[in-house]
Image (tube, grey):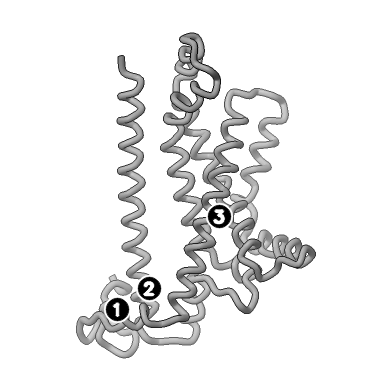
Amino acid sequence: MVVLPNGFSSGAYLQFPTPGLSLRWFRHLLRSRTWTDAALTSFQVALAASVLATALGTAAALALDGWSFRARTLVVMALLSPLVLPAVIVGIAAYTLFVSVRLYGSLSALVVTHAVLGLPYVLLSVMAALNQRDPRLGMAALSLGASPWRAFREVTLPLAMPGVVGGGVLAFVVSFDDVVVATFLAGVRTTTLPMRMFQAVESELDPTIAAVSTLLIAFAALVLLAVRALSALEHRRSAAALSP
């Protein structure tokens, strides 16, 4: 209720109620090299981290699916550990590691660490999707002469796809929204959008930060709508493929 009006404020500083409506702070945002560079960096890191987390998390979920070996619970707990570890602890550990291998301050360090943070979300999402499927469908495909790869590609993967997409989106959001770990790893030359927002909150009083927040709210809403549309489409395609 306060952020959105200030994003369109015509005033020179944050205030509520606003003196009038204007797009001046959105224009200022788009013309500012500092803000656009930070946004581009965050997008690049989040995209790469989400792709890596989605690939690894999906592979892990498929490998663990249907297995009942004794150490399975320990493996799952280890893969989910980034969910329960404080971000500060993860940041310190990652900082120590990447300083030792001379990757501190690089985008690669951010991508790898953010992928580790996003992997549990992909793993849980894909495992949930796999648990909802009927395992007899894969067996039926094999009994009808399909190769294991074809049965996976045409039966298992389409049924797991909503979980893959949902997990990938969550991994992207986790990376894009992170500020604690990024502060430990970014160095002095790299600034992500959340880091830039924190700097603005500490040192600036103009409504630029409100304009950024407004754009992020709109972006999150669009992503949510896109995920729901893709999930509905995948469900319809899976149902159509499995119907006689």
Determine whether 202 is above or below 54 in the image: below
Q: Where's the C terminus, which quadrant?
A: top left
Mark 1 or mark 2, which has the lower sequence index? 1
Residue at numbered disc 2:
212
Q: Position of residue 209 (x, y in %)?
A: 39, 78
Judge depth for marks 1 and 3 and give the one in front: 3
Q: Position of residue 107 (x, y in %)?
A: 61, 65
Which residue shows up at 77% across the image and 63% down it? 101
Query: Which label sits on residue 6?
Result: 1
Q: CA distance from mark 3 to mark 2?
A: 22 Å
**Quarter residue 19 falls in:** bottom left
Q: CA distance from mark 1 to mark 3?
A: 32 Å
Residue 192 visible in the picture: yes
Which residue shows up at 37% across the image and 65% down it? 216
Q: In the image, 121: left or right of 222?
A: right
Mark 3 or mark 2, which has the lower sequence index? 3
Residue 131 visible in the picture: no
| Crowding at mark 3 (Cα within 10 Å: few <14, some 14-19, many 20+) | many
Q: Position of residue 53 (x, y in %)?
A: 56, 48
Mark 2: which amino acid? Answer: Val
**Dot 2 lies on which element?**
helix
Q: CA distance from mark 1 to mark 2?
A: 10 Å
Mark 3: which amino acid? Answer: Ala
Judge depth for marks 3 and 2 and give the one in front: 3
Query: Which label sits on residue 49?
Result: 3
Q: In the image, 199: left or right of 28?
A: right
Determine whether 190 is above or below 67 in the image: below
